[in-house]
Amino acid sequence: MKPVLLLNVGTCFSATTPLWYTLSLDNRYVHTGHVKEHGYLCGLYTKDSNYVKKLVKKGERIKKMRNKSRMLTYMKKMDSKEFRKTHRPLVITMWSEFIKNNGEILFSEDITLQKYIDYYLEHYSNVKNDYVGVADFSNGSAELSKKFISDISGKLLENFDVKVTMIFRDPVRRLFSAANAISQNIGHRDPVNMIKVWVKGKMEDNVYYTDIYKKWSSVFGKERVHMIVMEEFWAGKTQPLSNFLDFSIKNVHENVYYPDMGVNAPHHDYLWDQWRSDIVSLDSELYKYLYKRMSFVYDEFRETFGYIPDMWGK
């Protein structure tokens, strides 16, 4: 049997980290290797030298950090509450018992699809006694073109039992969290004006839920592609994903975005990427303004999947 390769292809700010923890930490279904997401396929797709530079830099950091003294320091601090606020659980980090090298195959200047395949085949050999398969949780994969996905699909299917998941959150709330986070990253901390500009034109690729689903399912087939509604999954609707994976999900990791508490989000351990995102509250007036300009996302979702999730649009 071929090993499972799970590709979670977005969307950012839709609880991809709690989903990653659910499938790799709370239920040992897949292990992602050195990192949750590396954007390797995006580098292959765009041929952008910046992606290559980031991969090389990440590889240099991994090599530097994976020495014995650094690992011991990490392990000693794991019981610290403050440490857990800003780090990841050990078993899914580069210091995991399942990581046997510095990932030289993947984190190098010469990027090829074969190296991507070799990395995950090698990693599977390290985790096969404890996990069903391996995974790539790179959110950037939502931006890959249908042609590129088609071009790589054959070789991936030759080597893996490929399963594709994507998780969607209420479109307005997801984009608002994205604006909050990005406004902090660029230093101006004004997400309201930023998102008002965004919704007047072409928005970032993660907005277009049905486009993401259609291009992946048209290449791999609907039987290999599964859409998750974030709010439904954390409300207890986990069986559809269990059925798709042919794996019983017994535990679901906590999720800062459910229920959505905005700037008052709980500071759960290991979920700093969530509770740091929102710095401004989303009031009803702004929600209605954004919903009006993003109504096409909801309409396309209804047209594709036959319904609108109960917790969306409110």
Image (cartoon, grey):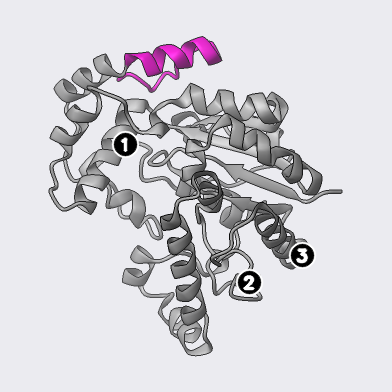
Mark 3 falls on what kind of element? helix
Whether the magenta-drawn stretch holds residue 131 is answered as no
Question: From which residue to which does the magenta span run?
Answer: 295-314
Residue nearest the observer in this picture, 273 or 63: 63
In percent of width and height, residue 185 lies at 23, 53
Q: Quadrant of the C terminus?
A: top left
Between the residue at mark 3 and the residue at mark 2, the CA separation in whole angstroms equals 11 Å
Given this view, does label 2 or label 1 mark the residue nearer the observer? 2
| Residue where numbered disc 1 is placed | 260
Mark 2 falls on what kind of element? loop
Q: Amino acid at mark 3?
A: Ser
Which residue appears at 30% of the width and 50% of the height? 275
Between the residue at mark 3 and the residue at mark 1, the CA separation in whole angstroms equals 39 Å
**101 up-or-down from 180: above or below:** below
Whether the magenta-drawn stretch holds residue 313 is answered as yes
Q: Earlier in the sequence, mark 3 or mark 1?
A: 3
In percent of width and height, residue 11 lies at 45, 38
Q: Residues within 10 Å of mark 2 (few under 14, many from 20)?
A: some
Q: Quadrant of residue 130?
A: bottom right
Q: Amino acid at mark 2?
A: Ile
Direction from residue 297 to residue 32 in the image, left or right: right
Q: Quadrant of residue 249?
A: top right
| Residue where numbered disc 3 is placed | 125
